[in-house]
Image: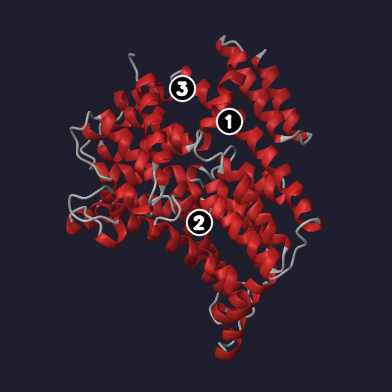
């Protein structure tokens, strides 16, 4: 009977049934096999409203659609050619950095694909990059940046770690950000190096640097280029908090494209752009809801606990443990969002890592790096589904496009895993203290969370994580 259901599932995939239907069918099959009432799937879906990454999705989606519908891509193409056109793979390198920058602030990689994909994809295609490379680059780059300040997952990681160890092992966000600096740059550097090699092999047209053209292109695209500068200034000034980046971005983009450049009509064009954007948001929200239901199944059946128990029983060598941990976390990254993974899986890993003598900072970077790659890993990585919907490409096409990037990131992950000093050296040298400029606080005054103003929303989220951890802890 099970084989028949699996064959039916494969048939649904073969006839290109909508992704959310296939995923819902698979989740219902898993629930039925475990003897769980199917109504629990839809009860758990309501928890999506409490997820921190839900609110930014429609706002960033609309901002991305506005940029794509305006003449912003043409202005950015001109600027990229003028400033980076002399470099092999210049525009692709710029795309990697831009995606990582936005992911740092949004804390959710799928949001980056939605917000920037509509602009970066046509830029890459217009400059001669192949479709598969362009899709893979944007999908892969959208998962980078979670190790850099002020990425929200780091704050959540430290909170869960502190709760799981009852505060006996001191760990601060500043030490994790320091630990992630070199590994984060390494992962970005791997993709950028591939961009350079691709640019040379494809003989992408390069243009000599012309200061006059660069200045004119800069003037034409200055309002788009000032967006990240304005966001950083507003954050440091305390005018907005991390949770307000999405509405601030939408407001800025709308004002620039409608009022300054006048590329879009405030009634005719904006209504169409909004309708198109919200159709995508609806599809993504359905998929997120179904994935959340499957997450609940994994937690209810204690699948992570079973895998880790097997690792503890049969693996005694630290090197083999790290290999098994990487494989396990890649699977977790495919099946669960990063916040659920922290609550459900991290408390189980911590005692194992302590037994094998893995430093807390090293474990944090391994955890984050694996989940970044897990977002891309076929067949069910979250970014694959989001890219498939956003670019209107088949899941197979997206999966094939990311394989070279996964291979490169796997090399970086191997170095991060087996060269602990990449993660532990900087926190030891600096002593775990961010500068006053970065932390926004003097000694003994405030906390690292105060660096960007009002964090009531984040504090509420941290309380939610604490409650979820206590609820899901084994033996309770």
Pointer 2 or 1: first along the chain: 2
Of the 4 image quadrants, the one containing the N terminus is top right
> Which residue is depicted at the point 34% across and 14% down?
476
Inter-mark Cα distance, 2 to 1: 24 Å
* Residue drawn at 63 percent across, 72 percent down: 76
Mark 2 = which residue?
Answer: 102
Query: Is 192 or 172 nearer to us in this picture?
Result: 172
Determine whether label 2 and label 1 are within 8 Å by CB: no
Determine which residue is flagged by label 1.
Answer: 291
Q: How far apart in space, not on screen, are marks 1 and 3 (Cα)?
A: 12 Å
- Element at label 1: helix
Numbered mark located on residue 299 in the image = 3
> Is residue 299 or residue 42 the one in the foreground?
42
Query: Does residue 352 appear anywhere in the picture?
Result: no
Q: Residue at x 53, y 53 (%)?
A: 142
In the figure, 205 relative to 95: above or below? below
Q: Residues within 10 Å of mark 1 (few under 14, many from 20)?
A: many
Q: Residue 249, how many percent across, how many down? A: 56, 56
Mark nearest the camera among 2 and 3 is: 2
461 or 302, nearer to the observer? 461
Residue 348 or residue 319, whichever sits in front: 348
Quarter of image, res 138: bottom right
Q: Earlier in the sequence, mark 2 or mark 3?
A: 2
Which secondary structure lies at badge 3? Answer: helix
Q: Residues within 10 Å of mark 3 (few under 14, many from 20)?
A: some
Task: Say whether disc 1 or disc 3 marks the residue closer to the N-terminus.
Answer: 1
């Amino acid at each position: 009977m099970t084989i028949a259901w699996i064959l039916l599932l494969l048939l649904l995939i073969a006839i290109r049934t909508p992704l959310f239907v296939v995923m819902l069918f698979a989740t219902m099959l898993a629930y039925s096999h475990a003897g769980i009432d199917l109504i629990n799937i839809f009860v758990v879906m309501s928890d999506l409203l409490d997820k921190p990454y839900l609110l930014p999705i429609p706002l960033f989606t609309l901002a991305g659609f506005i940029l794509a519908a305006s003449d912003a891509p043409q202005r950015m193409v001109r600027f990229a050619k003028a400033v980076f056109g002399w470099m092999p793979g210049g525009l692709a390198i710029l795309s990697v950095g831009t995606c990582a920058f936005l992911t740092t602030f949004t804390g959710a990689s799928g949001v980056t694909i939605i917000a920037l994909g509509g602009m970066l994809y046509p830029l890459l295609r217009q400059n001669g990059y192949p479709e598969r490379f362009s899709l893979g680059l944007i999908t892969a780059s959208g998962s980078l940046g979670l190790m850099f300040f002020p990425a929200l997952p780091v704050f959540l990681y430290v909170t869960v770690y502190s709760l799981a160890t009852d505060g006996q092992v001191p760990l601060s966000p500043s030490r994790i950000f320091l630990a992630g600096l070199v590994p984060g740059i390494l992962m970005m550097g791997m993709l950028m190096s591939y961009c350079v090699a691709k640019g040379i092999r494809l003989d992408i047209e390069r243009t000599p640097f012309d200061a006059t053209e660069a200045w004119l292109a800069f003037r034409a695209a200055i309002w788009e280029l000032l967006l990240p500068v304005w966001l950083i200034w507003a954050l440091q000034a305390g005018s907005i908090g991390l949770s307000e980046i999405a509405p601030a971005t939408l407001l800025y983009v709308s004002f620039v494209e409608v009022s300054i450049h006048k590329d879009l009509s405030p009634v005719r064009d904006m209504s169409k752009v909004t309708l198109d954007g919200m159709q995508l948001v609806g599809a993504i929200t359905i998929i997120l809801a179904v994935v959340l239901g499957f997450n609940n199944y994994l937690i209810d059946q204690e699948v992570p606990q079973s895998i880790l128990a097997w690792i503890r029983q049969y693996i005694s060598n630290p090197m083999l443990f790290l290999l098994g941990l990487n494989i396990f976390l890649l699977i977790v990254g495919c099946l669960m969002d990063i916040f659920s993974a922290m609550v459900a899986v991290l408390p189980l890993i911590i005692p194992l890592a302590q037994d094998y003598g893995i430093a807390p900072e090293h474990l944090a970077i391994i955890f984050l790096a694996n989940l970044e790659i897990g977002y891309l890993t076929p067949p069910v990585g979250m970014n694959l589904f989001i890219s498939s919907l956003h670019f209107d490409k088949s899941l197979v096409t997206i999966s094939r496009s990311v394989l070279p990037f996964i291979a490169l990131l796997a090399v970086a992950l191997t170095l991060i895993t087996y060269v602990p000093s990449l993660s532990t050296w900087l926190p030891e040298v600096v002593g775990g203290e961010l500068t006053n400029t970065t932390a926004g606080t003097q000694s003994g005054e405030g906390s690292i969370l105060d660096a960007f103003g009002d964090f009531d929303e984040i504090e509420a989220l941290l309380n939610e994580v604490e409650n979820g951890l206590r609820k899901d802890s084994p033996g309770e």
